[in-house]
Image (cartoon, rainbow, N blue to C red):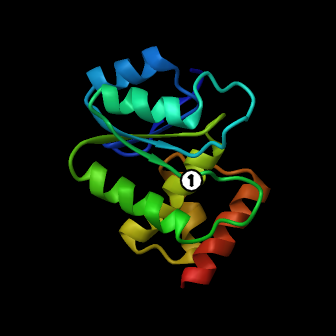
Amino acid sequence: MNLERPITDRITIADQPEEADLARFRDDGYGAVVNLRQDGEPEQPMDIAAEGREAAGLGMAYHHYAVGQPPLADPGVAEACDFIDRESAKGKVLVHCRKGARAAAIVLIQQARAHGWKPDEAVAKGRAIGIELEPPLRAKVEQYLNAQA
């Protein structure tokens, strides 16, 4: 893994973990994993089903929501955020994708929902807690948050 960034004391964003990384996260107190990748992406040591089995075998809750080219939309985004909310109330949650950008976007939306941030303040508040998005992904997040307002 090249990226592992705690956003809160219970939510960490990361790039693609391998089996040994999942075991290490479990040993570090993580009880849940959110995978935002689609099957067949490059640099994917485990397909989605295999990662889910690995997480379950380690006693970790697992949620998959494929974030790709289309705009961020419900029910997928809301379900991922609800999972993060529910599981972070119990313990630590790892949210990952290939390089960490999609993980940052979903966690920014989750944090905006959790803290009641208005769409026009979410990007700045996200930046303050360590979430920096590239313009195309930031636009998708803003579009999603504005649609929910």
User: What is the count of numbered marks?
Assistant: 1
View extreme (left): residue: 90
Above-or-below relation of 46 to 10: above
The residue under the point 58% across, 74% down is: 145
Residue type for callout 1: Arg
Residue at 43 percent of width and 70 percent of height: 113
Badge 1, how many Cα within 10 Å: few under 14, some, many 20+? few
Seen from this angle, which residue lies furthest bottom?
149
> Is residue 37 or residue 89 the one in the foreground?
37
Q: In which quadrant is the N terminus drawn? A: top right
x, y percentage for residue 66? 62, 51
Q: Using the image as rendered, state which of residue 149 and residue 129 is in the foreground.
A: 149
Horizontal side of 139 relative to 2 (left or right) equals right
Name the spot of residue 75 as percent of width and height, x first. 52, 70
Looking at the image, which residue is at 38% across and 63% down?
A: 82
> Which quadrant holds residue 25?
top left
Q: Nearer the viewer, residue 96 or 60?
A: 60
| Quarter in which the C terminus is drawn | bottom right
Residue found farthest to the top = 20
* Nearer the observer, 54 or 30: 54
Q: Which residue is mark 1?
A: 127
Q: Is residue 25 above or below residue 101?
A: above
Q: Position of residue 63 (x, y in %)?
A: 44, 48
Secondary structure, mark 1, is: helix
Name the spot of residue 146 as percent of width and height, x first.
62, 80
| 54, above or below 97, in the image | above
Determine whether 122 is above or below 62 in the image: below
